Each structure stands twice: as structure tokens, then as C-alpha cells.
Amino acid sequence: MANVALLSAASPSTSSAASLLPRRHPSRRSACFPRPASKLSVVAAMGDDPIKEWILTEGKATKITGTSSIGGGCINAAQRYETDAGSFFVKTNRRIGPSMFEGEALGLKAMYDTKSIRVPLPYKVGSLPTGGSFIIMEFIQFGRSRGDQSALGRKLAEMHKAAKSDKGYGFHVENTIGSTPQINTWTADWIEFYSKHRLGYQLELISQRFGDSAIYEKGQRLIKNMHPLFDGAVIEPCLLHGDLWSGNISSDTNGDPVILDPACYYGHNEAEFGMSWCAGFGGEFYNSYFEVMPKQPGFEKRRDLYLLYHYLNHYNLFGSGYRSSAMSIIDDYLRMLKA
């Protein structure tokens, strides 16, 4: 699920990936105790607002001319900061520390570095003095439509083809899928990774949160018997966006596709289509995609297996309304595999 839909277009100097991560320091006592206004308070106030501080220093702006709310999802708030150096997109969360945005920033930077499909470039992640965290990134002005499906398929495939991992399946940090933790421990084997850190983890959460032993037990049977679904497939650890639904897909003013709000990891490229049930991918998308990344044997048989991860996550996030969809997929596979 998306944290929030980005708009995004400015471009201050690009720093290294390390500079995206916040420096650890004690919270400022002064942030909790406002002081009387004085000539010194302007400097102090900027120091107590790390977003403005970054924009007016490393962001190369000399003044902020306005801010506007862009609207948020159920997790974060989002704002556009307008300055004399261009616009910045800022997301904040008043409850969660910077680790969630660190994972997002590293994912955005990894996708950006492929030079394939457009993503907003992240600039800074940090902690808020009163608790919570923020991320500052490029503001990309969206066009009037979601763009060309054919171009989206081709550029997504180019990203998958360009970025492979020599560490196996996983990612450099744990991140989140919506607000659910996403475990990205490096694993040499894809089936093991997907079984343990995707399906198995979601099933464990469902068992703990809802006491749903039926879906847990059937899901575990599927995990133990799903190996034949991968017969004949050549699987490589490709960089995935990880949460590609319609709310995370747009286009810029030139009509070029833009993807945002990722839950990145290196995995089987077919897993990228796991949110296709609410992404609106059509024939043009898949035809263009498979011209760059050829379809593997058994693709159709595996398709629902990758939907299942996201249905289970929606069950965990939003409740039992998604249970029947997940259980239906599991039951169908158990019949197919005679398990």
C-alpha cells in the first residue's frame, strides 16, 4: 500500500546515499519549551524545524515562499514547499521514527540510479524534534493522466533488467509494505525467501492478530508444496518497486511514467505484478514488458501466488474483508497441487 501519493520537481545538488540518513542526536529540549520572541529566536526557530533548515541550507534556497498540503494517506502527511530554488515534496509522520523513511529513500535512490523509469529523487531523511520523522524529495509535477501503459511496461522491465543483486534476494534494510514491516534478510534461494519472508511472515501476523488458524494452516501447506510452480523458470534477483498499484503510478508533464512510494527489494520480477488487481495493467503493458523481460514458463500458474502476498497484507492492515480473497487463492493452489 502507498504511504501517500507523491506529486513531485526541483533539483538541488544530489548527495550520497549516506547523506539521506539522519544523524543521531538527542532531541532538543528547547523544542518542548517555546521561548519569547527575539532577534535570536529566528535562528533558533530554524534549528527547531529541520525541514526548513535543510531547505534553506543544503537545498540552496534563500526563502520559502509558501507551503501547501497535498493530502495524505492513512500513514503520512504530505506537503509541497515552494521556494526560490524550486519546489520540494515533504512527507512527515508524527508517530514513527525515521527508519520507515530511510527504507523508502534507499529504495527510491536504487530505482533512480537505474536511469530507466522516473522516480522522485530523495534528498534528506531525519527526525522531528517533537517526535516522528520526515523525508524531503524532488517534487515532480504530474500530468493529467497516468500515462502510456506501453511505456510503463517497457520502462519497468528496463529497471528490472538493469538492477540485479549479487547478494541474493532481499534488500539492504528492512522496510514497510503499507505500515506492515517487510523483512528483507538476504537469502540465496527465491522460493525460500518468498516462503519465509513474504507469505510465511504475513501468515504469522494473521495468526497472532486474528487467531485465524484455518488460513494459517492452509497457507503453510501451500508453502510446503509450491515448488512445482517454479519448474522451468529462470529466476534472478531484480530490483522491484514492491508496491505497484494505481496510487503509486503516474506520469510527468511530458507523459513519461513515474512510480513512487516503493517497498523495494530484490526479487523475482513476476512478484512486481502482485498488486495488479488494483493497478489496471492491460494488454499493452504486459506486451511491452515481455518484449524486454521475456515471459517465463509457468507465468500464469504463478500469478495468483504473487497476488496472495498482498491480499494477506491487506487482511493484516484492514481486516477480514480481504480474508476470502486470500483463502480462495490458497484453496485453488492446494487443489491444483493436490496438497
Image (cartoon, helix red, strand yellow):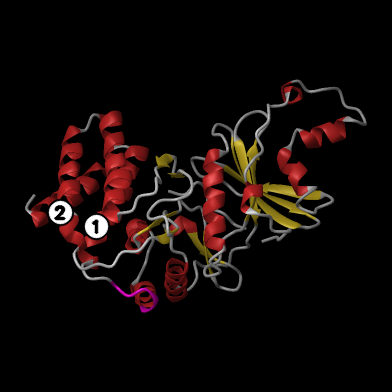
Vertical comparison of 143 with 316: above or below: below
Type of residue at label 2?
Answer: Tyr
128 or 35: nearer the eye? 128
Residue placed under numbered mark 1 in the picture: 304
Nearer to the camera, 134 or 7: 134
Residue for point 73% across, 59% down: 13
Residue 163 % position (x, y) = 47, 65
First in sequence: mark 2 vs mark 1? 1
Question: Is residue 336 shown left or right of residue 8?
Answer: left
Tell me the crowding category of disc 1: few under 14, some 14 to 19, or many 20 or more residues within 10 angstroms, Cα based. some
In which quadrant of the rendered view does residue 302 lie? bottom left
In the image, what residue occupies the spot 75% across and 20% down?
33
The answer, for residue 248, to whether it is visible in the render is: yes
Residues tagged 2 and 1 counted as in contact (Cβ below 8 A): yes
Q: Is residue 294 above or below residue 14?
A: below
Q: Quadrant of residue 24?
A: top right
Between the residue at mark 2 and the residue at mark 1, the CA separation in whole angstroms equals 9 Å
Q: What span is in magenta?
A: 291-295
Callout 1: SS: helix
Residue at image mark 2? 333
Residue 52 - label: none
What type is the residue that disc 1 sits on? Asp
Name the secondary structure under disc 2: helix
x%, y% of residue 312? Answer: 29, 44
The picture places residue 95, in percent across and down from the top left corner, at: 55, 31
